[in-house]
Amino acid sequence: MIPWKIMISGGTVSADATILRTGWLVAAFAICICLFPVYSYPSSAVLLDPDRQFQFAEQYFHKGEYYRAIGEYERFIHFFPESEEVELARHRIGSAYLRGERYEEAIEAFRDFTEKYPTSRYTLESYLGVSQAYVKLRRYDAAIINLENLITIAPNQDVKDEAYYQCGWVYLEKGLWDNAQVCFNKISPQNREKYKLEQFLQELDKKTQLKRKNPAAAGLFAIVPGAGHLYCERYRDALVSFLVNGALIFAAYEAFDHDQNALGVIVTLFEVGFYSGNIYSAVNSAHKYNRHERNRFLRYLEEHSRIKISLAGPRHDTTVLLSYQMSF
C-alpha cells in the first residue's frame, strides 16, 4: 500500500489509504441515513362497533355455540363497558354456561349478575337460572333456599307463583311428595288455571298407585339366597345368588364331611361373605326399584303435565313478563 502524506499545521500525518477510504464511506452512509426521509405506512385498523359486536355474540348464542358466545360477550363488555347492552350481555353469559352444562360457572355468573344489578329486569330470571343449575347438580336444598329468597324479593304475585311452582318440582325430585303439594297449593287462585294445577294435582295423586318394594321384606326374604332378588323382580341376580351360595354351602359341607376342617373353615368364611352380600344386595335392590319407579313417574309428569315458565320480554322493555309453555 502507498501511504498518503497530509500536511496539517506545517507537519505531515501518514495514514493508510484503505482506512481513510472506509472512514469516508461510513461517514457518507451516515449522512444519507440522516438526510433520507423516513416513511411510515399506517396499518389497517379494525374498528369495533358495539352493535355489531353484540349481534356477533348473539349469533353464537342462538346457534348453540355457547362457549364462543361467552367469549364474544366478555369482549363486548370489555370494550364497551358503558353500553346499555352490558346488562343483557352479563345475563347471557350465565345462560350460556347453563345451556352449555357448566353449572358451577352458571351459578357464579348469575350470582354475580344479581349482585351487580339487584333491580334489573333480568334479576328474577337469574334466580331461576341459579335454581335450575343447582337441580342439575342434585343440590336440591340449595335450589330450594334460592327459590325461597326469590319469593322474598319477588315484586308481584306472578313471580312468587312461578317460584312456588319450581320449588314444588324440586321437592318432587327429592321424593318429598307432601312438601311439593304444599308448594303447589300456595299458588294464588288467579294463576292456578295457568299452571293447569287441578289437572296436575290429580296426576300427582296417582303416586299412591306406584308399585313399591319393602326393603325390610326384601332383606327378610333374602334369608333364602336369591329370594330377596326374586321379590324385587331381579330374576338373573336371584339365580346367580342362589347358585353361588348353594355351591359354597355344599362345598363347605363336603369339606367337613371328609374331615378337611381347614378347607371347610375357609369355604365357610367365603360363604358368610357371599351370604351377607346377598342380603345387602336384596335390600339395595328394593331401594333401586322404588327409585326407578319414582323417576319414571316424574318423567311422565314432566312430559304430560309440566308447564315451562320463563321470565321474558323485549330487550328494551322495562316490564317483566311471564311466558309459559305446556307439554302435551
Image (spheres, helix red, strand yellow):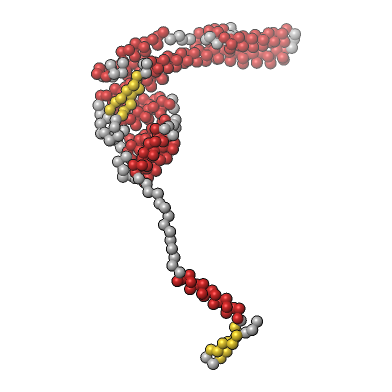
Residue 77 pos. (x, y %)? 36, 43
Total labels drawn: 0
Quarter that holds the N terminus: bottom right
- Say left or right for 129 vs 285: left
- Whether 45 is drawn above or below 5: the answer is above
Quick check: 314 left or right of 9?
Answer: left
Q: Quadrant of residue 82?
A: top left
Residue beneath the point at 72% across and 14% down = 263
Residue at position x 31%, y 13% in the image:
198
**Residue 273, position in %: x, y?**
62, 16
Which residue is drawn at the image coordinates 53% and 7% (left, top)? Answer: 231
Q: Position of residue 113 (x, y in %)?
A: 34, 36
Q: Residue at x 42, y 32 (%)?
A: 64
Pick the front one: 85 or 156: 85
**Left or right of 151 on screen, residue 9:** right
Can residue 137 be seen here?
yes
- Residue 96 appearing in the image: no
Residue 204 appears in which quarter of the rendering? Answer: top left
Q: Quadrant of residue 84?
A: top left
Left or right: 96 as drawn, with respect to 224: left
In the rendered image of this protein, does residue 130 appear above or below residue 296? below
Q: Position of residue 219 (x, y in %)?
A: 53, 10
> Quadrant location of the C terminus?
top left
**Front residue (pair 73, 36):** 36
